[in-house]
Structure formats: structure tokens, C-alpha cells
């Protein structure tokens, strides 16, 4: 229905629809588009870095610009590409998986997206306004305090705004999963992706406040002459590192746990088997999340915390390998004896297991604090975290896109191109990063803009750059695949993969109200149960009645815009007091939007019973 | 008859919310009193320095309890999940602080 409608409408009304939408499915599209844009940007930055390192003492870019590139590559990929695409997938699938009509707070959901987008744009506009941040993605205070110009200020304000959006998103998902599960959908019947979304949201809720505080302290130090991190004035620069990693370590689990859930769903769907060790998987996810908060200092082994503290954090770090190992074995045993279909989604999932396991293994190596003095700040670390983030998060995102594309857009991505981009990306990924382990062991430090002749680093770096270009080619093929499927792609039926969970029980793409009647869930993998024991249809869990829906709103966009303008005001008020106009004006505008939103009586609208009845009869035919 | 029973539930609900309001006001008053005491013992030298810190801590914990149980309704039924999340957060924060202290003073 929606595709036919969009085909006829003008571009203006299409745009207005997306600017004002509070529908979780459309917000998912927005998140994927926004995250995809920043993913391309971050990918181009990666290619610039690799071109600079293609040969010794290259002068493709200047040292200063190289610092901006590494900083923006890391920041963009983690905050503006990885997390938003994951939140997009959660938005697309989680409400459908628990049998809900939307998330708990649809308005807040739209606000989350616009805050992310405006924060991301603010951060990237720094390129046009006198230079991007250049203190690394961690932006350690000792470097950030010294960075001239406004680059780091853009980092602070951009991440502050985008981070507020992420925090709201996390709270929204928690409330949705706690309160809006369909009748019969107990906690222990939730699909693993929903479980992972829940636990990730809890991690967001607890991990983002330290980042917020840290960014505020850094902002006060840089703009308002406080001295939290200024050693010369009695501050302590190590506090920044602690606060950053108290956030930063849970952050890497925020990036990987949703994909653990997603892979569990994919493995069980394409093996046509119930997930092996469902309960163990749920508790392993919780355990990883819990331990993730206790290991932050392993990023700081060489700071000089002392042998006792280092040992405690080393042991904690290695302990995380246990629940992760449980998961790896459960995935293997899910496939064992199953009727395995290997398509694009499954290929990405299969490629993930060895890649991520290598990353986990080097993680344990890095977790040994004695050995870490050798690895610290070399390319070994770069190889490690790219193995887990690319081999885990990016592979997972591609798998998830192939898996849910039919549900999200009603078209199936082309299998041939999907397999081609997997194999090229897989080869390019290992070419790029495997050799970097050895470059690191040979002593190549990370974040240096050149390396010297005759140190045995030439060949490794050349191979690494070639691999990066292969990943670029694979990404271009994937983007072409999206365009191709939008124009010529095969129309998807409701259940193209012979799925097991609730999202496959409704049409592709789903109607805007998702379910005419909320479904009744009789167990884990509800659709599979109905296929085996019932008539293949999910029984309704409520009588047919009018459905309450929220109205769209343009206010979230305006609120984001207000904070965006205030962000510029904060950054430039140190130069000229006229900028206070933007600062106070932007904040006043956003607060005005909040007041308008609070005072207006918007009770939403009802879809009449008759319309739903017609839709149900249409489906029956 | 249905009207009658509706009236009764209405009366019951009103009484309940009146009691609830009373409790909120009492705990609100106590919190203000605690805050005043805290400021008073720090501003004036009536209490010995060694006792100030424990007294402040105890009052802070009681205030946090009021906040959670009365204002955020943890005492009511159906609040198991919020309670779990709040105590999970308290536990994570406690371990983080404990970790930082171990690093600083061990």
C-alpha cells in the first residue's frame, strides 16, 4: 500500500512525510539513510588514510590533515555510522518482533533521530569551518586542551547533541520492551535480537551519562577556563581517560551485542532449527553487558595505575571471553544438523564467526597487561579493534540489511550482487587488517602520518591499502544493489526466508499500524510454532477494534535545529559576543518547542474498525 | 446498581489518592528538613567534624530512598522492572566508584 502511495505522491509531500513522521518503520529508514551517509563519509576518510600510508614517507596529505582524518574516521564510524544503523535496525525489527504497533514514545523516537542527524552534521561541518577535530576519536584531554582552533569544540558539541538522541533512543527501547510485548510474549519467548536490543539499551542508559559529563567538563575547560583537566592549574588529565573509558568500553558492547542477537536470529532461521541454548544465550548476553562495565581500565594499562589495578582489570577482561565463547559454540551447534541455506545474509553471518573470533583472541592477548606494554599504541591494536568492529558490527549490519531488507522495503536484494560484495569485502577486510597485526608487532605505531623506508613496513602497508580499496568496491556494489533492487528488484512476499519470528507474519512492508489485531504468542519462535502445529497463521490476541495511532509532528525536527544553532553559538561565543545571539536564540527556540509540545493537546487518532476489517479480508484473499 | 458500585470505586479511588498525596507531602517535607539540617550542621560548628560526613551520608541515603520509593513509586506493585534497572544502575555505579578508589588508594 505504502509503495503504491509513494509512487503517486509529489516529492514535496514525500519529504514532508519523512520530516514529520513518528512511525518506527519510517524512522528506521531515516536512521539507515543517515547512518549510511556517514558510513560512506567515514569510508572515504579511511581510504584517504590508507592512500597516505601506501608507501613510505608519502606526502599525499599533510600531517595536520592526517590527524583530522583519523579523528573523524573513528568518530564518524562509531557514533554516526555504526550506532545509528544499529538503532535503525532495532527500530525496524524490534517492535515487529514483540508484536507492538510502535515504540513506547513515538515522538521521542523522532526527536532521537533528528538530534543524531543535527549532531552529526554539526560535527562534520567543522571541515568547512577551519578544520576538523584532530585529537583522536578518544579526544584525550591532554591533547584536546592543546588543540588550536575550533575542531575539538565541534567534536564536543556534535557528540553532545547526537549522544542526547542516542540516550533517548535507549530509554525508548527499554520502555517499549518492558511494556508493549504482545499477549503471551513473555521475556523468555522474546527473539534474541529483541533481547540484545533490550540489554544494549540498558548499556546505553548507563554508559552515556559518563560521556555526557566528560564532554561537559572538557567543554568548560576549553571554553570557560575551568581547570578539571588542566594539570598546570591543579586539575587531573587522567580523570578524562577514566570517564571516557567508563563510557567507552560499554560502548564497544553497544556496537556488538545487537549483532549477536541478530546473528542468533539469522542462524536459527537459515538452519531451520530452534536456537541452540536459548537461555544460555540470554544470560551470556547479560553477563557480557555486566562485565563490560568492569573492565574499562584495560584501555589504560600503560597509564601507570600500578600492578594490582592492572591485574584486576586484566582478569576481568579475560573473563569476558567465557560468555562470548558460549555464544560462538551455541551458534555452531545451532547450525549443526540443521538444514542450512547459504544466501547473502547467511554468508555475512558465517564470515563473522572466524573474523570475530580472531578479534576476540587478540583481545585476550591485549588483555594480558604484561604483553600489553608491547602492543600498546601499535598497529596490533588497530588490527584488533577493526577485527571486532568490522568483522562483528559491519558484517552484522550487512547481514541484517540483507535479512530485513524485504521486510523494510518490500524488495529482495539481489543475491548474486550480495554474494559478490560479501566475498570481495571479506577478502579485502582480511587483506587490510590481518597484515596489520604483524606491522604492529614489528613496531609500527598507530596514528603516525608517515613511516620510514627500509624498516620492513612497505609491503605490509601496500597490501593493507589494496585491501581497503577492495572493501570500497564491495560497498559500492552493495549501494548499486540497493538502487537496483529499488528499481528492478523482486517484490518480497510476507515471509521470504521461511521465518520463525513475528515480523514475518505480516506483509512486506508492513501496514503503518503493523498488526490489525495484536498477535497471540504461544511460545519461542511463534510463527514456526504456528507453521508446525497450527495453520501457519498467528492467532489474534485481542478482538478487532479501533486502533489508536499517534499524529505526526514537525516539532522534533525544529527542536534538533534549535540545538544545532545553539551548538554553533557555544563554539563561537569565545570569539565574539554576538554569537551569544545564536547560543541563547537556539536554546530558547528548542525550549519554546518543548513548551508548545507540552501545552498542545494531541490525543492522536483512531483507525476505524471497518478499515482494519477490510485489510484483513484483503489478506485472506 | 451499577451506578452505585461505580460511586463506591470512585470514593475508594479518591481516598487512595488522598492518602498517596499525604504521603508525598510528608516525605517532601522530611526531605526539605533533612536538607536544612545538612546545611545547618555544615554551616555552624555544632557537630564535631568526624561526625559530619557519616550524618550527611545517612541522610543522603534516606533521601534517595524517599525519592525512589515515594516519588518514583517503587513501593507500589508492578514496579519490579524499574526497581531492577535502578538497582542495576546503582550496582554498576558502586562498582565503578569502588574500582576508581582501589586504583587510587591501593
Image (cartoon, coloured by chain):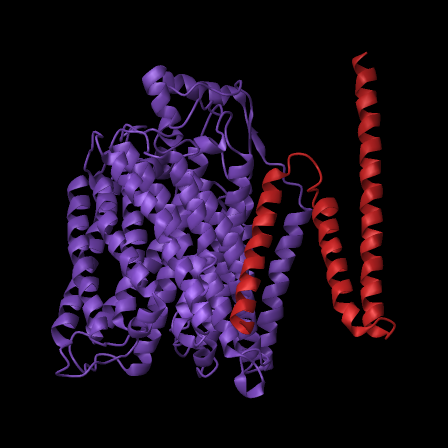
Chain colours: A purple, B red
Question: In the rendered image, which quarter contains the C terminus of chain A?
Answer: top left
Regarding residue A557, the answer to whether it shows in the image is no
The picture places residue A372, in percent across and down from the top left corner, at 33, 70
Relative to A581, say whether B67 is above or below.
Answer: above
The picture places residue A306, in percent across and down from the top left corner, at 45, 74
Front residue of A247/A588: it is A247
Relative to A346, say whether A147 is above or below.
Answer: below
Question: In the rendered image, which quarter contains the N terminus of chain A?
Answer: top left
Q: Is residue A361 left or right of residue A224?
A: left
* Residue farthest top in this picture: B1
The picture places residue B51, in percent across and down from the top left corner, at 79, 68
The residue located at (46%, 24%) in the rendering is A519
Could you tell me how many numbered marks the image carries? 0
Q: Quadrant of residue A268?
A: top left
Q: Is residue A374 left or right of residue A196?
A: left
Q: Quadrant of residue A385?
A: bottom left
The residue located at (85%, 71%) in the rendering is B47
Front residue of A450/A557: it is A450
Front residue of A479/A592: it is A479
Q: Is residue A170 left or right of residue A259?
A: right
Q: Is residue A612 left or right of residue A620?
A: right
The picture places residue A269, in percent across and down from the top left corner, at 29, 32
Q: Quadrant of residue A284?
A: top left
Regarding residue A152, the answer to whether it shows in the image is yes
The residue located at (88%, 72%) in the rendering is B46
Amino acid at each position: 500500500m505504502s509503495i503504491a502511495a509513494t509512487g503517486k505522491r509529489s516529492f514535496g509531500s514525500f519529504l514532508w512525510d519523512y520530516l514529520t513522521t513518528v512511525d518506527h518503520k519510517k524512522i528506521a529508514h531515516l536512521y539507515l539513510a543517515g547512518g549510511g551517509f556517514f558510513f560512506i563519509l567515514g569510508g572515504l576518510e579511511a581510504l584517504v588514510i590508507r592512500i597516505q600510508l601506501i608507501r613510505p614517507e608519502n606526502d599525499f596529505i599533510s600531517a595536520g590533515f592526517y590527524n583530522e582524518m583519523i579523528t573523524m574516521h573513528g568518530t564518524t564510524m562509531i557514533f554516526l555510522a555504526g550506532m545509528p544503523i544499529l538503532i535503525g535496525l532495532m527500530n525496524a525489527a524490534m517492535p515487529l518482533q514483540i508484536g507492538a504497533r510502535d515504540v513506547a514514545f513515538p515522538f521521542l523516537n523522532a526527536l532521537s533521530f533528528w538530534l543524531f542527524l543535527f549532531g552529526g552534521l554539526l560535527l562534520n561541518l567543522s571541515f568547512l569551518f577551519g578544520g576538523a577535530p584532530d585529537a583522536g576519536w578518544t579526544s584525550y584531554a591532554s591533547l584536546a586542551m592543546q588543540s588550536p582552533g575550533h575542531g575539538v569544540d565541534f567534536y564536543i558539541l556534535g557528540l553532545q547533541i547526537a549522544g542526547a538522541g542516542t540516550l533517548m533512543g535507549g530509554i525508548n527501547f527499554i520502555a517499549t520492551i518492558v511494556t508493549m510485548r504482545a499477549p503471551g510474549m513473555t521475556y523468555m519467548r522474546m527473539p534474541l535480537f529483541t533481547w540484545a536490543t533490550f540489554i544494549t539499551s540498558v548499556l546505553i542508559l548507563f554508559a552515556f551519562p559518563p560521556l555526557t559529563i566528560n564532554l561537559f567538563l572538557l567543554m568548560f575547560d576549553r571554553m570557560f577556563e575551568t581547570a578539571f583537566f588542566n594539570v598546570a592549574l591543579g586539575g587531573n588529565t587522567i580523570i578524562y581517560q577514566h570517564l571516557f573509558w567508563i563510557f567507552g568500553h560499554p560502548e564497544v558492547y553497544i556496537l556488538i551485542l545487537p549483532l549477536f542477537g541478530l546473528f542468533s536470529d539469522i542462524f536459527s532461521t537459515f538452519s531451520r532449527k530452534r536456537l541452540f541454548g536459548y537461555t544460555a544465550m540470554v544470560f551470556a548476553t547479560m553477563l557480557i553487558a555486566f562485565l563490560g562495565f568492569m573492565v574499562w581500565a584495560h584501555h589504560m594499562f600503560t597509564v601507570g595505575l600500578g600492578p594490582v589495578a592492572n591485574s584486576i582489570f586484566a582478569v576481568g577482561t579475560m573473563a569476558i571471553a567465557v560468555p562470548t565463547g558460549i555464544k560462538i559454540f551455541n551458534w555452531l551447534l545451532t547450525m549443526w544438523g540443521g538444514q542450512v541455506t547459504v544466501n547473502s545474509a547467511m554468508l555475512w553471518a558465517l564470515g563473522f564467526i572466524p573474523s570475530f573470533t580472531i578479534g576476540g583472541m587478540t583481545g585476550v592477548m591485549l588483555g594480558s597487561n604484561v604483553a600489553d606494554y608491547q602492543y600498546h599504541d601499535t598497529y596490533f591494536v588497530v588490527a584488533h579493534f577493526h577485527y571486532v568492529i568490522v568483522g562483528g558490527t559491519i558484517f552484522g549490519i550487512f547481514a541484517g540489511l540483507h535479512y530485513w531488507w524485504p521486510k523494510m522495503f518490500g524488495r529482495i536484494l539481489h543475491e548474486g550482487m550480495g554474494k559478490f560484495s560479501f566475498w570481495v569485502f571479506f577478502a579485502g577486510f582480511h587483506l587490510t587488517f590481518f597484515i596489520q597485526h604483524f606491522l604492529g608487532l614489528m613496531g609500527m605505531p598507530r596514528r603516525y602520518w608517515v613511516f620510514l623506508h627500509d624498516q620492513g613496513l612497505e609491503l605490509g602497508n601496500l597490501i593493507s591499502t589494496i585491501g581497503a580499496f577492495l572493501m570500497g568496491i564491495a560497498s559500492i556494489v552493495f549501494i548499486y544493489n540497493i538502487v537496483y533492487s529499488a528499481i528492478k528488484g523482486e517484490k518480497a512476499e510476507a515471509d521470504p526466508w521461511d521465518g520463525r519470528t513475528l515480523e514475518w507474519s505480516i506483509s512486506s512492508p508492513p501496514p503503518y499500524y503493523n498488526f490489525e489485531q495484536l498477535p497471540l504468542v504461544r511460545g519461542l519462535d511463534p510463527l514456526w510454532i504456528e507453521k508446525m502445529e497450527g495453520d501457519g497463521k498467528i492467532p489474534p490476541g485481542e478482538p478487532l477494534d479501533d486502533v489508536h495511532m499517534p499524529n505526526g509532528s514537525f516539532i522534533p525536527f525544529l527542536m534538533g535545529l534549535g540545538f544545532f544553532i545553539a551548538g554553533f553559538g557555544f563554539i563561537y561565543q569565545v570569539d565574539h559576543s554576538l554569537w551569544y545571539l545564536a547560543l541563547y536564540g537556539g536554546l530558547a527556540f528548542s525550549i519554546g518547542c518543548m513548551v508548545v509540545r507540552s501545552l498542545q493537546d494531541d490525543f492522536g487518532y483512531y483507525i476505524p474498525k471497518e478499515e482494519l476489517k477490510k485489510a484483513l479480508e484483503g489478506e485472506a484473499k | 446498581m451499577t451506578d452505585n458500585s461505580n460511586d463506591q470505586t470512585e470514593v475508594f479511588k479518591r481516598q487512595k489518592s488522598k492518602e498517596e498525596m499525604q504521603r508525598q507531602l510528608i516525605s517532601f517535607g522530611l526531605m526539605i528538613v533533612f536538607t536544612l539540617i545538612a546545611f545547618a550542621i555544615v554551616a555552624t560548628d555544632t557537630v564535631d567534624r568526624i561526625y559530619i560526613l557519616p550524618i550527611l551520608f545517612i541522610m543522603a541515603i534516606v533521601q534517595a530512598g524517599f525519592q525512589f520509593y515515594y516519588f518514583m513509586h517503587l513501593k507500589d506493585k508492578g514496579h519490579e522492572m524499574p526497581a531492577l534497572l535502578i538497582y542495576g544502575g546503582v550496582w554498576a555505579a558502586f562498582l565503578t566508584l569502588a574500582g576508581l578508589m582501589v586504583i587510587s588508594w591501593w
